[in-house]
Image: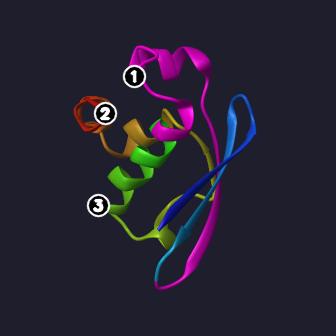
Amino acid sequence: MITVETIDERTFKVTVTGRSTTIHTVTVDPSYHTKLTGGSVSAEKLVEKSFEFLLERESNTSILRSFDLPVIGRYFPEYETTIREMLA
């Protein structure tokens, strides 16, 4: 289960509950949010779907504890294309 809490307009606390529970701090620059979503979905939803993307590829214990959302693309080059499809 993925729970996203807003800390401020660009910072989110994500709790992933599974075999073990992990907590992550994710930052999303408003311009990157717009680039990926065109403003059609909330930043919270973008973060939630991004964690769904990550959990399809690795365990929650392998996900960085703190990162900027664009970092996902460094590890998974297909991220931006896939996340747009997931949000469409």
Name the residue beneath numbered marker 2. 87
- Mark 2 to mark 3: distance in Å? 16 Å
Please indicate whether residue 44 sits to the left or right of residue 7 in the image: left
Question: For the residues carrying marks 2 and 3, which lies nearer the camera in this image?
Answer: 2
Amino acid type, mark 3: Glu
Residue 45 picture location, percent across and down: 48, 39
Are there few (<14), some (14-19), or many (20+) residues within 10 Å of tag 2?
A: some
- Mark 1 to mark 3: distance in Å? 19 Å
Q: Are marks 1 and 2 in contact (CB under 8 Å)?
A: yes
Where disc 2 sits, the SS reads helix
Query: Which residue is at 43% across, 15% downward?
Result: 35
Work out whether mark 1 precedes mark 3 in sequence or the reverse, and give the earlier one. Answer: 1
Q: Residue extending furthest bottom?
A: 19
Name the residue beneath numbered marker 1. 36
Res 6 → quadrant? top right
Residue 4 picture location, percent across and down: 60, 52
Where disc 1 sits, the SS reads helix
Please indicate whether residue 43 sits to the left or right of residue 57 in the image: right
Amino acid type, mark 2: Leu
Disc assigned to residue 56: 3
Are there few (<14), some (14-19), or many (20+) residues within 10 Å of tag 1?
A: some
Work out whether mark 1 precedes mark 2 in sequence or the reverse, and give the earlier one. Answer: 1
Span highlighted in magenta in the image: 19-45
